[in-house]
Amino acid sequence: MNFPITRMRRLRSNGTLRRMVRETALSVDQLILPLFVVPGERVRREVSSMPGVFQLSMDEAVKTAEEAHHAGVPAVILFGIPPEKDATGSGSRAADGIVQRAVRALKETVPTLQVITDVCLCEYTDHGHCGVLLPDGTVDNDATLELLAEEALSHAEAGADMVAPSDMMDGRVGAIRDALDGGGFDSIPILAYSAKFSSAFYGPFRDAAESTPRSGDRKAYQMDPANRLEALREVELDIAEGADMVMVKPALSYLDVIREVRDNFLLPVVAYNVSGEYSLVKAAAERGWVDGEAVAREILLSIRRAGADLIITYFAREACDWLG
Ligand code: PBG
């Protein structure tokens, strides 16, 4: 069975044959584009640490989403930056909040676009944490659940197709499922950020979403990057609470976790190719150190090969051009 009888190169000899034996496919159908919505009109402000990514007012977000959908992007995930922040993040659950209005506008203009909303408090709280604080400055898990449930319900009422809790509070998937079902939204799926690690790769996102915690960090609720078994437990619990899809985030430093989740569970696995992963590629490409497009393609393919069904990525729109 060995050389010279076996020659691995036989099946690599030309492009058509390589296409036939390719094991992993990457398609625009699997990509979800994040959008950052800010107050105002005709605002299109590039995020300095994320070239090609913009904070968009609602009118601009609609245009961007419409164009991306036309190019092939099936879904967006929305993040809102409210005009005012407070201790409990009340802008997150207001019927006329930034995300709620953006959802309505998007569903009206681009009805076939799947609109997913990020459910979290960090963009809406003046302290920048993902929940409400106890007097000692730690996040109050159980008091936060109610607020997240209200936020998710308000997104569904605005017309969101799916909600995606990213806060990492214990019990939030169940609380959100109850609230959605109670409000008549039993057919709205939950995409749970299940294995969300406390990662330095979120740096540029916090510029984009203006959500850097004013003090402390998120280590008391987001996962320790060293832990894989705990990630599987997180996924298992979210599924038990009613998650319809589970997420691993970030993607690149956690490809092993994506693979294990894929091998151990039966529902769709989503990977978040996060802001820092995007910005590293853009920065190196700007300097001419790497071929940005080729590197991005290889990254997205590797995330698929690791077992992700869907990928949330800032490359989603440009990928439509390369993937055709
Ligand atoms: C909010 C949230 C974060 C990201 C998605 N939702 C940031 C964080 O937890 O600090 C990060 C996404 C990215 O880096 O692209 N909780």
Image (cartoon, grey):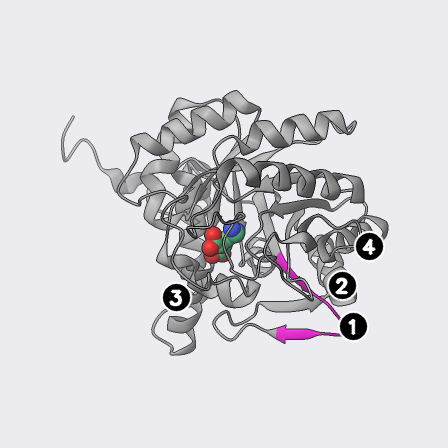
In percent of width and height, residue 213 lies at 46, 61
Dot in front, 4 or 3: 4
Q: Which one is earlier in the sequence, the residue at label 3 or at label 2? A: 2
In percent of width and height, residue 269 lies at 49, 34
Crowding near pointer 2: few (<14 within 10 Å), some, many (20+)?
many
User: Is 312 in the magenta?
Assistant: no
Crowding near pointer 3: few (<14 within 10 Å), some, many (20+)?
some
Which amino acid type is marked by label 3?
Answer: Leu
Comparing 7 with 61, the one in front is 61
Q: Which numbered marker is on residue 154?
A: none
Any part of residue 141 in sight: yes
The residues bearing labels 4 and 2 have C-alpha atoms spaced at a distance of 8 Å
The residues bearing labels 1 and 2 have C-alpha atoms spaced at a distance of 7 Å
Which amino acid type is marked by label 1?
Answer: Glu
Q: Kindly check if marks 1 and 2 are in contact, taking CB atoms under 8 A apart as contact.
A: yes
Up-down relation of residue 153 to residue 137 (above or below): above
In percent of width and height, residue 84 lies at 67, 65
Q: Mark 3 points at which residue?
A: 280
Numbered range of the magenta stretch: 35-45
Up-down relation of residue 137 to residue 287 (above or below): above
Crowding near pointer 4: few (<14 within 10 Å), some, many (20+)?
some
Where is residue 42, by image quadrant? bottom right
Q: Kindly check if marks 1 and 4 are in contact, taking CB atoms under 8 A apart as contact.
A: no
Q: Is mark 4 within 8 Å of ligand 1?
A: no
Q: Mark 4 points at which residue?
A: 105
Q: Name the residue under label 2.
A: 58
Q: Name the residue under label 1.
A: 41
Lateral position of residue 231 relative to residue 122, left or right: left
